[in-house]
């Protein structure tokens, strides 16, 4: 089968890039023009270890744990590998070195520079140097003879020279290359190579062929070429066995030849045709790593082996991936992009079957039997296993370096498990931290500050930096206990370390905000219990341990609650009184993690919000960050870059609010999240090019990303406005949470959010109107407030969509009713709490409907007035004072008699509930059609009297009048505490007090009667026919009665409607006449009062008289007060 070309990935910034394998082939090492040397466990490793060696790295070589680099400061440096610790400078040039190579045993390095010189330096003693002069232009490449006798160099002067190392002389020279004045202008970097072990042949890439020269004679033995190669070859390398030669061209072609047969075995084309500048064979064959001039890294697998056959690479079938190995403690889980077992470093790092002994060894060091873990029939025989064993046997015969004893095939071997594979459980981590194996790392980066850890030969310390220095100044702490975890708040620094053989795991807190002198405390964990995650909140600290316990402490060190976790902890975070803990609920399969989340409030009112609910992650991803927004909403980020936030407005569900991958330019780029803000909507993170986390130096720059909910058709105007609306709703849920829990919050922000949401709804409404989507318009109106619905009604009317306007009118009525009912119920409960003592009420008083029709009240008013007079005279004073404010008669006449109420009301400057301004119109008189009087009603300003009426009766057919905002204040006016002498007053004294305000009430009533709007013909008709409508439809509510009446009234002929209109006009005239009759002289008051009492007694058994007129509430109140005097 042909070789397999893995997808390329970003490795370094644009520029020359070099690549090689380490001595064992367990990792790939690259360097680039960004000055970093990166160690990749495999091609899918998104978390490579990075060693910064300089501003720019031109070339590097690796051997025996030593890393040699040619960097931009004209030096050749040496570092330890894989630690990356600097180990000195081997040599210097006047300009930068272009290429460095090790000899076979790693005791010497050769370096070629742009100053035309070549140097050979002893690694152990850099003073032992040899300089080779003779080139007339910058040196391009070098290669050591395997026997350390010769050194070959290529130069921009067009020559390839062979030097004798012992006497530093040039043995031979070939003018093979095109001349140029600098490396950057060279058509080819001409990376030549000697044949391994024997060194019989020297391979030199020249134009489109690979020339092979024989040792000692320096004759050109033969050339390797292929029609597949159409551009200049720039680099050549030998397979470890010395049988194959691979070459890369400037247009991205890679070809592999068998030197013995001179046959081209493999051909590969770069996916973007970039120049191949780095090429390396795996130390044991089977794989070729390559890099291009754009900084990308690629891998070829299953490349030809020594027998001319294809190698299957490292055996990646179920044979080597048994169940137990997936949960090996040595698995560096976070270093893999995918969590599938196939992406483990052991599977992808090596290239042929000879390396299988790594996978076939148990932790105890004994060979693992090649069989399945799940038991089955003992007599079954697996033919695939026989084939694998036979292939391994063939490979072992050809490998002299390592061999695996072939296990005999037995009939007792069991079949392989072919079902879903368990996913290795994610290890615990601290949000905002970089991997702990780094010598310089971030222990935490959050909205408060940054904690860095330095653990090298010079120092082992912790630096704490605050974004706001007014909280605390920067701090330098020793790290003698090797703390690996940290968290930072505005009150304290929390550190934790793992246990050792001598010391227990410790939790250390630096409480810098403490007002006393002792600002530090330490707690030792019990034996065999290690801290795995820590966090800080407001006034408390918490840690999760390996015993699956969460321990809570006060910020001063007092131990508080302890509770168990259902599984091993993954991470935890705190904010204010909230604690969120992420843990393993179970074992995931096929690359998925199985995580659970607990959200607990540990303040004075302790409660659990999330009870171990599953944490939804993207497919085949793992958790990378968990925390809270600055406003206190839990959030988390997974390895696919999806940011999710808790939606408190939808039953504490999780909603994705951002996909950071959309902002990444390259496939291997990531954003490292450090903070989330809801107002303003900002995602603060650090861009990481080719890595998942940033280096500590240079200081990373913080980027701000915007949020975007993944709604459909986001490119359309409708989709954009829908996304903006719901994003505004989600990101302002925290205001409701803060208000419910008694926290301070910005009222202006809440108002601005509501305004923004209503504007977006109106825009969507207008768009739907233009598209003739009237049903959608009604759906949108359902999200609107009552005022916005009124605007929608106006827009629909002006757009000549009368059916839509009528629908919206009905919705406005329903919204007014719904908004009034809960408020009145809440007010009723409030009065019940205050008036509970000594108040006797019947069940019917509290159970009366709150929403009444004004017309129906007018029918019952006369008898109510008479009954009220009797109650005023006979009722005890304390009972009158505690009358039900929700009674149908509104309670205003009764409230006017207690002297204390009147005096207290006026003394506190409250508005007189009986006083009506001269220009006030009666809000109870209005036409049946809302649209006709829309603008008029919307301009009305309700007076105190109208607010008093609206308290007990919500508008039924007039939804456009804004509801009164302060009902509690008005109710308090009527229920002021009595003065100490109020109980000694008699009824006559209170009546005398009431007479004092009579002239004012009479004057107001006169003005109101003159300006009162008359009834319409429809209202007169509805009064007469209400009973018949109810008889036909007994289940109708008040609003439905009016609709039915309107439909029946329209059916009448024009003459009949005219008759009712004339009646209404006549009723208006008689109404004013009766109002005048009510103005009686003062000397007849007592006589009229006695007559009214007698009449009310006689008529108590008779049907209530229907009033032909519609006096306003103010007129009735003034007349009633007049009678009492």
Image: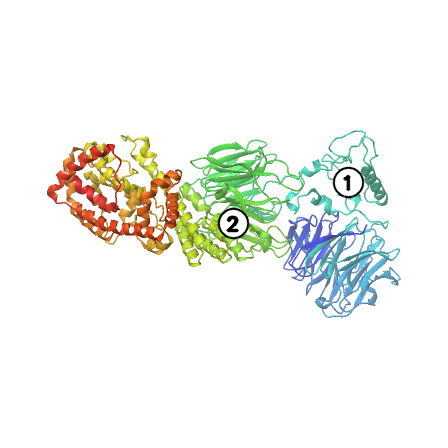
In the drawing, what numbered circle is on residue 527? none
* Label 2 – label 1 distance at C-alpha: 45 Å
Counting from the top left corner in percent of width and height, residue 353 is at 79, 44
Q: How is the image coloured?
A: rainbow
Furthest residue in direction top, as rendered = 378
Above or below: residue 973 compared with residue 1100: below
Q: Which quarter of the rendered picture does the C terminus lie within?
A: top left
For residue 951, say whether it is visible. no
Counting from the top left corner in percent of width and height, residue 580 is at 52, 40
Label 1 sits on a secondary structure element that is helix
Which callout, 2 or 1, points to the residue nearer the camera? Answer: 2
Label 2 sits on a secondary structure element that is strand
For residue 230, say whether it is visible. yes
Q: Residues within 10 Å of mark 1 (few under 14, many from 20)?
A: some
Furthest residue in direction left, as rendered = 1083
Can you identify the residue that label 2 sits on?
A: 675
Q: Residue at x 78, y 65 (%)?
A: 232
Q: Nearer the viewer, residue 315 or 419?
A: 419
Above or below: residue 513 compared with residue 290: above
Report the side of 1 relative to 1041 (left or right): right
Q: Residue at x 44, y 58 (%)?
A: 800
Q: Earlier in the sequence, mark 2 or mark 1?
A: 1
Contact (Cβ within 8 Å) of mark 2 with mark 1: no
Counting from the top left corner in percent of width and height, residue 591 is at 66, 42
Q: Nearer the viewer, residue 277 or 647?
A: 647
Above or below: residue 527 compared with residue 251: above
Counting from the top left corner in percent of width and height, residue 1057 is at 33, 51
Q: Residues within 10 Å of mark 2 (few under 14, many from 20)?
A: many
Q: Nearer the viewer, residue 487 or 953?
A: 953
Q: Nearer the viewer, residue 844 or 662?
A: 844
Report the side of 185 relative to 974 (left or right): right
Can you identify the residue that label 1 sits on?
A: 357
């Amino acid at each position: 089968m042909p070789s397999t070309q893995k997808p390329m990935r970003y490795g370094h910034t644009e520029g020359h890039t070099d690549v090689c394998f380490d001595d064992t082939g367990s990792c790939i090492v690259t360097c680039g023009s960004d000055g970093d040397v990166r160690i990749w466990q495999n091609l899918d490793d998104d978390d490579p270890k990075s060693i910064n060696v300089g501003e720019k790295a031109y070339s590097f070589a690796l051997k025996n744990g030593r890393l040699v680099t040619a960097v931009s400061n004209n030096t050749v440096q040496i570092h330890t590998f894989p630690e990356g610790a600097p180990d000195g400078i081997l040599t210097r040039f006047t300009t930068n070195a272009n290429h460095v190579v090790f000899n076979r045993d790693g005791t010497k390095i050769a370096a070629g520079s742009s100053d035309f010189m070549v140097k050979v330096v002893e690694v152990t003693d850099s003073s032992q140097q040899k300089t080779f002069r003779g080139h007339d232009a910058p040196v391009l490449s070098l290669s050591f003879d395997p026997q350390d006798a010769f050194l070959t160099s290529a130069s921009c002067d067009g020559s390839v020279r062979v030097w004798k190392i012992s006497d530093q002389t040039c043995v031979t020279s070939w003018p093979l290359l095109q001349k140029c004045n600098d490396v950057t202008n060279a058509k080819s970097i001409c990376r030549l190579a000697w044949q391994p072990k024997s060194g019989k042949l020297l391979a030199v890439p020249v134009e489109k062929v690979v020339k092979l020269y024989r040792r000692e004679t320096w004759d050109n033995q033969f050339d390797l070429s292929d029609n597949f190669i159409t551009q200049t070859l720039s680099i050549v390398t030998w397979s470890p066995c010395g049988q194959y030669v691979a070459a890369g061209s400037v247009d991205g072609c890679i070809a592999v030849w068998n030197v013995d047969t001179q046959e081209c075995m493999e051909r590969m084309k770069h996916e973007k045709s970039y120049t191949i500048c780095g090429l390396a064979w795996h130390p044991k064959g089977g794989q070729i790593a390559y890099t291009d001039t754009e900084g990308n890294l690629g891998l070829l697998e299953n490349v030809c082996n020594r027998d001319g056959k294809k190698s299957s690479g490292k055996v990646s079938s179920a044979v080597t991936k048994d169940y137990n190995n997936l949960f090996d403690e040595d698995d560096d889980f976070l270093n893999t992009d995918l969590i599938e077992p196939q992406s483990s470093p052991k599977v992808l790092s090596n290239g042929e079957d000879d390396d299988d002994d790594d996978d076939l060894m148990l932790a105890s060091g004994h060979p693992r039997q090649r069989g399945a873990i799940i038991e089955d029939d003992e007599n079954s025989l697996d033919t695939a296993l026989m084939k694998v064993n036979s292939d391994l046997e063939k490979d072992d015969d050809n490998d002299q370096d390592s061999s695996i004893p072939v296990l005999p095939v037995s009939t007792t071997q069991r079949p392989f498990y072919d079902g879903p594979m368990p996913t290795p459980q994610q290890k615990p981590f601290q949000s905002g931290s970089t991997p702990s194996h780094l010598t310089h790392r971030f222990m935490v980066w959050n909205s408060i500050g940054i904690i860095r850890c330095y653990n090298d030969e010079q120092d082992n310390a912790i630096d704490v930096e605050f974004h706001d220095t007014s909280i605390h100044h920067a701090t330098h702490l020793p790290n003698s206990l090797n703390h690996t975890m940290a968290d930072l708040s505005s009150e304290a620094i929390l550190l934790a370390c793992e246990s050792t053989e001598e010391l227990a795991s410790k939790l250390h807190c630096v409480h810098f905000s403490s007002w006393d002198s002792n600002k530090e405390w330490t707690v030792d964990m019990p034996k065999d219990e290690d801290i795995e995650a820590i966090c800080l909140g407001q006034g408390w600290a918490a840690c999760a341990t390996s015993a699956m316990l969460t321990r809570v402490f006060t910020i001063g060190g007092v131990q508080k609650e302890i509770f168990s976790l259902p599984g091993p902890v993954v991470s935890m975070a705190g904010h204010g009184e909230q604690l969120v803990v992420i843990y393993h609920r179970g074992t995931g399969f096929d690359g998925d993690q199985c995580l659970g989340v607990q959200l607990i409030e540990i303040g004075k009112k302790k409660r659990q919000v999330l009870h171990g609910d599953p944490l939804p992650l993207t497919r085949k991803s793992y958790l990378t960050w968990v925390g809270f927004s600055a406003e206190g909403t839990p959030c988390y980020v997974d390895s696919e870059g999806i940011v999710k936030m808790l939606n408190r407005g939808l039953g504490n569900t999780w909603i994705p609010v951002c996909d950071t991958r959309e902002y990444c330019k390259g496939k291997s780029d990531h954003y490292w999240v450090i903070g989330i803000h809801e107002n303003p909507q900002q995602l603060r993170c650090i861009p990481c090019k080719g890595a998942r986390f940033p280096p500590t130096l240079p200081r990373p720059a913080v980027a701000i990303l915007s949020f975007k909910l993944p709604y459909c058709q986001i490119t359309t105007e409708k989709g954009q406005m829908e996304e903006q609306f719901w994003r505004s709703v989600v990101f302002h849920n925290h205001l409701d949470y803060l208000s419910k829990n008694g926290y301070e919050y910005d009222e202006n922000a809440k108002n601005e959010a509501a305004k923004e949401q209503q504007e977006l709804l109106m825009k969507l409404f207008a768009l739907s109107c233009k598209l003739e989507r009237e049903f959608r318009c009604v759906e949108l109106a359902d999200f609107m407030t009552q005022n916005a619905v009124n605007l929608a009604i106006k827009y629909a009317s002006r757009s000549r969509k009368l059916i839509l306007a009528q629908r919206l009118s009905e919705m406005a009525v329903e919204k007014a009713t719904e908004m009034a009912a809960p408020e009145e119920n809440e007010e009723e409960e409030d009065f019940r709490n205050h008036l509970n003592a000594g108040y006797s009420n019947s069940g019917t008083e509290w159970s009366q409907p709150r929403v009444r029709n004004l017309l129906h009240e007018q029918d019952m008013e006369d008898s109510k007035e008479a009954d009220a007079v009797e109650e005023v005279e006979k009722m005890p004073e304390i009972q009158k004072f505690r009358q039900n404010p929700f009674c149908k008669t509104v309670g205003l006449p009764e409230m006017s008699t207690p002297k204390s109420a009147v005096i207290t009301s006026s003394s506190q400057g409250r508005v007189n509930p009986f006083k009506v301004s001269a220009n006030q119109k009666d809000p109870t008189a209005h036409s049946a059609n809302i649209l006709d009087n829309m603008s008029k009603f919307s301009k009305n300003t309700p007076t105190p009297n109208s607010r008093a009426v609206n308290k007990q009766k919500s508008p039924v057919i007039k939804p456009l009048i804004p509801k009164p905002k302060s009902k509690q204040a008005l109710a308090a006016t009527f229920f002021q505490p009595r003065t100490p002498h109020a109980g000694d007053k008699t009824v006559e004294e209170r009546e005398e007090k009431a007479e004092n305000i009579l002239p004012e009430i009479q004057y107001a009533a006169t003005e109101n009667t003159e300006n009162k709007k008359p009834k319409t013909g429809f209202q007169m008709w509805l009064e007469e026919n209400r009973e018949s409508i109810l008889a036909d439809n007994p289940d109708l509510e008040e609003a439905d009665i009016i609709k039915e009446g309107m439909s029946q009234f329209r059916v009448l002929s024009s003459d009949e409607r005219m008759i009712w209109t004339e009646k209404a006009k006549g009723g208006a005239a008689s109404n004013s006449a009766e109002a005048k009759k009510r103005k009686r002289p003062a000397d007849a008051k007592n006589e009229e009062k006695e007559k009214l009492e007698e009449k009310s007694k006689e008529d108590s058994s008779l049907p209530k008289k229907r009033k032909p007129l519609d006096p306003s509430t103010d007129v009735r109140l003034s007349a009633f007060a007049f009678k009492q005097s």
